[in-house]
Image: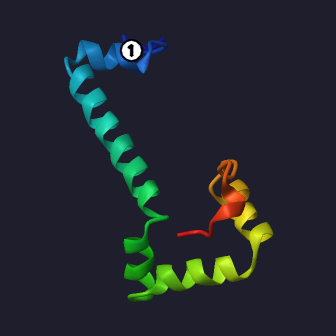
Amino acid sequence: MSNNCHLGSAFDDFLEQEGILNEVTEVALKRVLAWQVEQAMLIGDEFWDQIGGEGTYNNFIQEANSLGKDYRERIYREFLGIEPPPDFDEYLLK
């Protein structure tokens, strides 16, 4: 048999016994928040202009608008995962 006192215990219990649970939790939360911010930036104009050159975002929006209402509606539902706003028919993507 093993003399490992941590065998079968929860990882949080181990971290607490080592006196580092709060520190590890804080670092993990910061990393999750940083990842979420990075994911949110993926749809911003600065991101698209950075990877495609100045004007890339505006060109994309113009092309999406030229494809019509059905395509704009798909962008909301399939890519953004949200329902189009109530006044969706009255405006173009910006």
Q: Residue 21, position in %: x, y? A: 27, 21
Residue name at image x 45 percent, y 55 percent: 40
Neighbours of disc 1 within 10 Å: few (<14), some (14-19), many (20+): few
Q: Residue 74, position in %: x, y? A: 75, 63
Q: Is residue 79 left or right of residue 48?
A: right
Q: Which kind of residue does numbered mark 1 sit on?
A: His
Q: Give the image quarter of residue 59.
A: bottom right
Way the structure is coloured: rainbow
Q: How many marks?
A: 1
Residue name at image x 72 percent, y 58 percent: 78
Residue name at image x 33 percent, y 17 percent: 14
State whether residue 43 is above or below residue 30: below
Front residue of 21/81: it is: 81
Q: Give the image quarter of residue 47.
A: bottom left
Front residue of 21/4: it is: 21
Residue at the outermost right position: 70
State whether residue 32 is above or below residue 81: above
State whether residue 82 is above or below residue 43: above
Front residue of 21/75: it is: 75
Q: Residue 29, position in %: x, y? A: 33, 34
Disc 1 is placed on an element classified as: loop
Q: Residue 77, position in %: x, y? A: 72, 54
Pointer 1 residue = 6
Front residue of 57/37: it is: 57
Residue name at image x 48 percent, y 85 percent: 56
Q: Is residue 30 left or right of residue 56?
A: left
